[in-house]
Image (cartoon, helix red, strand yellow):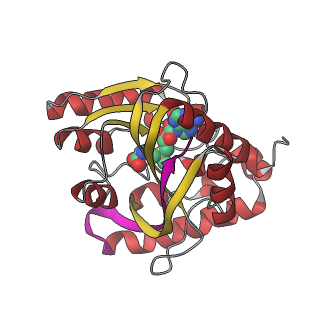
Amino acid sequence: MTQSSPESFRPNRESFDKLYRGESPLPGGPPPDAIPWDIGQAQPRLMELEALGAINGEVLDIGCGPGDNAIFLASRGHSVTGLDGSPAAIDRARARAADAGLQVRFDVADATELTGYDAAFDTVIDSALLHCLDEDGRRAYATALHRATRPGARWFIWCFSDGNVNGVIAPMGAVPEDSIRDTLAGAGWRIDFLGPTTYLGNAAGFTGDPDVLPSEVLAAMPPERLEALRQMGERMSKILPLVDGDRVFLPFTVVHATRIG
Ligand SMILES: C[S@@+](CC[C@H](N)C(=O)[O-])C[C@H]1O[C@@H](n2cnc3c(N)ncnc32)[C@H](O)[C@@H]1O
């Protein structure tokens, strides 16, 4: 991987951990104003799914971040484990569960391995993790989840799409539908439903101006990534004063899948 390849700017375990610690994920960048996905509550589409009875048995919230989805599910009586690759995310999630007075098992784990969780779960929630992984990572993750679940388990995925919501597009690469289909089929998962949906983000987390980054970081960044960051920062800065509580809907794909075999 070259320094300027798109992969060298894909978020990774360390960059996520820096964000949760209030530091810039890019060298020499300013501290973030907000974390783009931290809205301090569960995702509306997940809450609807739960109300409709789709969540059963032992639940895994994988890539749980600050934990609000897992905490919501626990508040509805589910037995939930939240796992994330970032220790700082897990610290936040544990603190939020304690504040809410709810029992959730939160631990650090790599989604592409899930060592020690064989046949542990009946329902898996993936809220914005899949698009953080490259193709090899997505394949390893789907295989690890097959091992970590029981026969008939359900897997609900929300990831960036290449659609738009009132002109708002995804801030980073969407996962192509063909790739989702190949990855899941290759790891023993049947797709029951795949379609467009929305994810509620924190607009204040997207307003950063990339041009404040050190010149060597800008020079190493793929030009299309830099341009996408500039456009996103400009758009979000414009709409921020107009939206309720800094919240903005982002274009996502939702997948409902069942474990086979
Ligand atoms: C976009 S955030 C979404 C967080 C949360 N699910 C939500 O919707 O608010 C993606 C999360 O996945 C975690 N993550 C990324 N790669 C991971 C991996 N290989 N294993 C476990 N967690 C990972 C990050 O630390 C981050 O918390």
Residues in magenta, as a range: 242-261
Q: Specify whether residue 255 is painted magenta.
A: yes
Q: Horizontally, is 155 left or right of 78 in the view?
A: right
Q: Is residue 41 visible?
A: yes
Return the residue found at the far top: 116
Identify the residue at image location x=61%, y=43%.
11
Identify the residue at image location x=61%, y=59%.
172
Q: Is residue 89 visible?
A: no
Foreground residue, 161 or 195?
195
Image x and y of residue 190, in percent: 55, 54
**Image quadrant containing the N terminus:** top right
Image x and y of residue 59, in percent: 35, 37
Q: Horizontally, is 19 left or right of 49 in the view?
A: right
Q: Quadrant location of residue 232?
A: bottom right
Foreground residue, 180 or 188?
188
Image x and y of residue 26, in percent: 62, 42
Predominant SS along the magenta part: strand
Return the residue found at the far right: 2
Identify the residue at image location x=17%, y=39%.
77
Q: Horizontally, is 239 left or right of 105 in the view?
A: right
**Image quadrant containing the C terminus:** top right
Foreground residue, 126 or 187?
187
Image x and y of residue 42, in percent: 29, 51
Foreground residue, 212 or 157?
157
Q: Horizontally, is 92 left or right of 214 in the view?
A: left
Q: Quadrant location of residue 231?
A: bottom right
Return the residue found at the far bottom: 166
Identify the residue at image location x=50%, y=26%.
109
